[in-house]
Image (cartoon, rainbow, N blue to C red):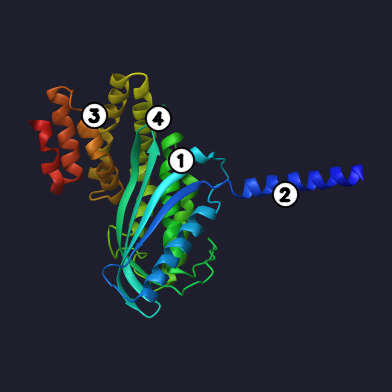
Amino acid sequence: MKKGFIKTIASLLITLSCAFTSNAQDVKAYVRVNAEQIGGTSTNREIYDEMNQALTEFINSRRWTDATFTEDERIECNFVITLEKAAGENYTGKLQVQASRPVYNSGYSTTLFNFLDPNLTFNYTQYQKLEFDENVYENNLLSTIAFYVNIILGINFDSFSRYGGSRYFEKAELIVSLAQGSDDIGWKAFDSDRNRYALVSNYQDERLKKLRDIIYEYHRFGLDEMVNSVEKGRTNIFNNLPYLKEMNRAVPYSIALQLFVEAKMNELLDMFKPATAKEKKDLYEILQSILPTQSNKFQELLN
C-alpha cells in the first residue's frame, strides 16, 4: 500500500514535470484577425474569431527554441492579419508583424522588429487542425507565420548574444527555400526587394553582417548599459551607427537596414536630444542616407 502510494505520487510528479516542460513556451504572441474590409455574416465572423484563436494557440503552444524561458522572459510579438478579399476558403490580405524586447532593469521595452507584409494569401477551413513541419512546405499561412517567428527569434537572440540568432535565421531561410516551388507570393528572389526572400537574405548576407553586431552592441552595451550610465550607453550606440552608412553603400536599399532604422528612429531622436551639434548632424546624415524619403521625421536634429 505504501509502495503503491509512493509510486502514484512519483508518477504524478513526473506527469506534472512533463506538463510544465511542454508548456514552457518561448513566444507570447498576440494575434488579431481584422475582417472589417470584407464584412460578412455572423457565420463569417465566427470563422474569423476561430481563425484568430487557432493562430494564437498555434504560435503560443509551440516550442520554437530549446532555450528555457520564464513567463516574464517570453518574447512578446504581435501579428495583425488584415483580410482584404475572401472567396470561399481562400483569403487575401496583409500581415503586420511587431516584436519588442525589455531593456535591462527598466520598465521600458524597445522595438526589435516592425514590418508590414502586403502579400498574404492563404487557404483556411474553419476548425482545421493547424499542423506545421518546418522541413515541408504545405501551408502558406503557417509557413509565413513560422518564418516571421524565426526572424523575430533571430533578432532577439542577436540582441543578447553576438550572432546568437544564427540558427533561427537559418530556419527562416529554410522555409523560404522550401517555398520556392510554390506559386504563393512573397517568397521569390527578385520579385521584390522587401519580401520574405529579401529579408532573410539580408540577415544572411556577409556584406551586412555588421548589422548583427550593431543589434548586439546597441542593446547590450547601449540600452542595457543606460541603467548604469546614460552617457556611456549613448556613446556606445553612437560609435556603432556609422557602420550603418557603410553597409548602406555596400547594399543600397537594404530592407534589414531600413527596418532597423525605422524601429529605432524615435528612440534615437529622443536619446540624442542632449547631444552636441556635431553628433546630431552626424546622426542626421546616417539616418537620411538609409531613409531619404523620411528625412522630415528627423529634421529636428538640425534645428
Q: CA distance from mark 4 to mark 2?
A: 38 Å
Q: Is residue 254 visible?
A: yes
**Mark 1 or mark 2: which is in front?**
2
Q: Earlier in the sequence, mark 4 or mark 1?
A: 1
Above or below for 184 versus 215? below
Mark 4 closeness class: few <14, some 14–19, many ≥20 residues within 10 Å: many
From the image, tell me which residue sits under label 3: 271
Q: Earlier in the sequence, mark 4 or mark 2?
A: 2
Q: Where, by quadrant of the figure, is residue 120 drawn?
A: bottom left
Indicate the amino acid at tag 3: Met
Amino acid carrying label 2: it is Thr
Q: Give how far apart the Cα atoms at labels 4 and 1 are.
A: 11 Å
Disc 1 target residue: 157
- Locate residue 238 relative to residue 20 in the image: left or right: left
Can residue 245 be seen?
Answer: no
Viewer-proximal residue among 205 and 235: 235
